[in-house]
Image: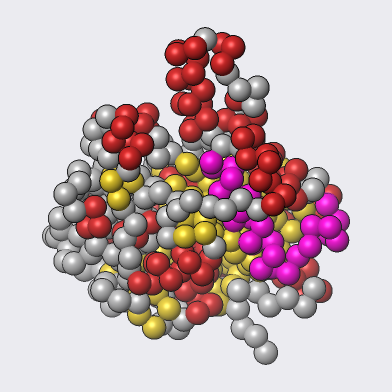
Amino acid sequence: MTDDIAVTGIGLVTPGGTGTESTWEAVCAGRATARTDPVLAEAGAPVRLACRVPPQEPQERVRGRLWRFDPATRFLLTAAREAVASAGLDPGRWDPARVAVVVGTAAGGVSTLEAQHRKLLASGPGALSPMTLPAFLPNMAAGHLAIELGATGPSLQTSTACASGATAIITAALLLRAGMCDIAVAGGTDAMVTPLCASAFAKLGALSRREDDPGAASRPFDRDRDGFVLGEGSGVLVLERTDHAAARTVRPLAFLAGFGATGDAHHATAPHPEGAGLRAATREALARAGRSPGEVGHINAHGTGTALNDTVEATAIRELYGPGHAPSVTSAKGVLGHTMGAAGAIEAALTVLGIARGTVPPTAGFTAPDATTAGIDIVRAAARPQRVGLALSHSLGFGGHNTVLAFTRARHG
């Protein structure tokens, strides 16, 4: 087993609330956040359901600069401040050259791009904001965060669609292991609840159309699932090598013991029908962690609530673990919706919290499986007390991206 990468801090901004405790409470309560969205409704989007981040009160130091940032960047800055503070770190006292920033996103500042394009069409080039490019270019969330933290180590953005946040965590771990930094602030962010994105996903048939019952629209693994609900938010983890965390006398929340990443090379939007890439990424993560499938106690599933994803993911889980061992399985998307490039980081954070607190949240919206999702231990109805020593977090993305993160419990003597 490898435990050289410690998770020492977490920050969350999600439709469940701003801050780790708000999100954790919402997820454990199974409180769905899907609502009819007024922006999508006004724009005439074919599906008007969404999971929005509640309005945030900006911190004093950024209050006058909010116009510079896309919502995805604002979510990220807030989550990162919480993560850094919870790790017991002070950006004014660390060596900035030894701090890396790695951020995953599926769409960059797409809210800004859409808004500015509407201004261009309506009023011409003179109406554009001078901050259009710095706000929407995909790398700029990482750039703005590095500026905010004063971090001068490696700063980069990853994009593997809905696996982007998990890919950022893997990239950060590789930077730490390569000795390129001592601290990595890593996560994902997206704000894709926009008319263009909602309409495009609806055109693909990926969104739930249960508009008469928004609270029951997102139904991961359920027999009545009909698609995901578009969400937004950010999740950030602070990662350090274990020796660095020990030198600071900080207690890790968990260890990132292994990770795997594969490509399906199969289809632009559909996962491999047999889950070959997900199974390969799982085996890779377990091999790096020095563990076997029989040791996995819990899986935080990608669990989108689409027919294809849930079928493939359930099939892969059944084949990997067999009838003699059934890890508990949950999906946060029943509460938070699909937060796109942020999902992998948000769900990694929830996996760490579950290990640290001995609790597995329920899968909101799940009542009963169909033939394709049967045979796995999906936590339903209420949070389950469970002491987990090894947990996996799955993330899949358009283009055939598969990532699996393996977390282990921190033992404190």
Going by the image, does 294 lie left or right of 316? right
Q: Residue at 75% across / 43% down in the picture?
A: 147
Q: Position of residue 317 (x, y in %)?
A: 32, 63
The magenta stretch spans residue 160: no
Q: How is the image coloured?
A: secondary structure
Asked if residue 246 can be seen in this view, the reply is yes
Q: Nearer the viewer, residue 35 or 299?
A: 35
In the image, residue 267 lies at what x, y percent? 33, 34
Residue 289 pos. (x, y %)? 56, 67
Q: Quadrant of the C terminus?
A: bottom right
Pick the front one: 160 or 29: 29
The residue segment tinted magenta is 71-96
Is 80 in the magenta? Answer: yes
**270 w.r.t. 292: above or below:** above
Question: Which corner quadrant of the image does residue 193 belong to?
Answer: top left
Could you tell me which residue is drawn at 57 percent across and 53 percent down? 57
